[in-house]
Image: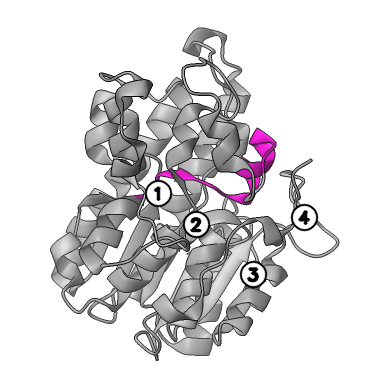
Amino acid sequence: MARTSTEQVAQPGPAERPAGALDGKVALVAGATRGAGRAIARELGGAGATVYCTGRSTAGSPSDYGRSETIEGTAQLIGAAGGTAHPVVVDHLDAGAVRDLVDRIEQEQGRLDILVNDIGGEAYVEFGIPLWDYDLQAGMRLFDAGFRTHLQTSHAALGLLARTAGGLVVEITDGTRAYNAEHYRSTVFLDVTKTAVDRLAYAEGHDLEPFGGTAVSVSPGWLRSEMMLDGFGVTEDTWRTAAASNRGTPDAVPPYEFVISETPAMLARGIAALAADRDRSRWNTRSTSSFELAGHYGLSDVDGSRPDAWGFISALETTPAGDLDVDRFR
């Protein structure tokens, strides 16, 4: 049985962090309880930023995800990395609560330099159901969690962020703009949600440009998060062997494509490097990936690899798995 603690997700070491590169910066990471959001908050804090990390799961009061990770646990990881963390329990579907959060940041810090919108809603996805048979309430729950949270948080926070030139907004989505333009993402609600998040970053970039700000959408590859490991019934020690053994077996769990998965650390390292880049405006309105950011900034995952998940998944569409050199995508 897969563990549900943070131990199963490989954690980045301090060597690859741009120590001090974000000193004096203030960041808000929405959806920082686990997975990518937790890793991003940890990296930003380790690089010197003061990080407000939000989520719904707190000690003694878990969210409906039913997970063991808490926002306090994320704050502890940031502290262990040498950073300053402010864990705040916020439901980002509550516009008033989000406004109160931004007001608090303004009162306590007087500025906001980095906003990362990472709430995904993937736990609410139902696959293989056409739109007309999809439960509308369930579909809207996915859309609200995966997109409306981003929109409401940006609506509340961008006024403060735009006061200081050089602000950065990162919208975390699933799939790059180029990939999603050519691929249907399994269900209408998931497809619309993830492409809407990318378009939000594109639009935000246009609004922020006159104020010296940058907005970008970033997609990880196949993320080896706590929830994904548990969902596939594997651990950090067994995932590669389990996925490789399913080559050529349709609908296997975990799927063969999971051999080119990545830990949340690679995405987090790329975003921390982007935030520290004085020329980050070159990324404004763009869609990018953890793989592209890692290549641009010379970064890797915790094991030294640089997985190209989207390249691998695309290659499998035209080339039999047995004919692909897996190592070429690591």
- Separation of disc 2 and disc 4 at Cα? 18 Å
- Separation of disc 4 and disc 1 at Cα? 23 Å
Q: Secondary structure at mark 2?
A: helix
Lateral position of residue 1 relative to residue 325, left or right = right
Q: Say which label, 2 or 1, has the lower sequence index.
A: 1
Q: Say which label, 3 or 4, has the lower sequence index.
A: 4
Disc 1: CA contacts within 10 A as few (<14), some (14-19) or many (>=20): many
* Label 2 sits on residue: 264
Magenta includes 299? no
Q: Nearer the viewer, mark 2 or mark 4?
A: 2
For the residue pair 272 and 103, the one nearer the viewer reads as 272
Q: Secondary structure at mark 4?
A: loop
Q: Residue at x 61, y 17 (%)?
A: 135
Query: What is the basis of the colouring in this image?
Result: one colour
For the residue pair 61 and 40, the one nearer the viewer reads as 40
Q: Do residues under tags 4 and 1 come within 8 Å of each other at their CB atoms?
A: no
Q: Residue at x 50, y 42 (%)?
A: 146
* Label 4 sits on residue: 68
* Label 3 sits on residue: 74
Q: Say which label, 2 or 4, has the lower sequence index.
A: 4
* Label 1 sits on residue: 220
Q: Do residues under tags 2 and 1 come within 8 Å of each other at their CB atoms?
A: yes
- Separation of disc 2 and disc 1 at Cα? 8 Å
Lateral position of residue 77 relative to residue 314, left or right = right
Q: Which residues are magenta?
A: 219-234
- Separation of disc 3 and disc 1 at Cα? 20 Å
Q: Say which label, 4 or 1, has the lower sequence index.
A: 4
Task: Answer with the quarter of the image where residue 65 lies.
Answer: top right
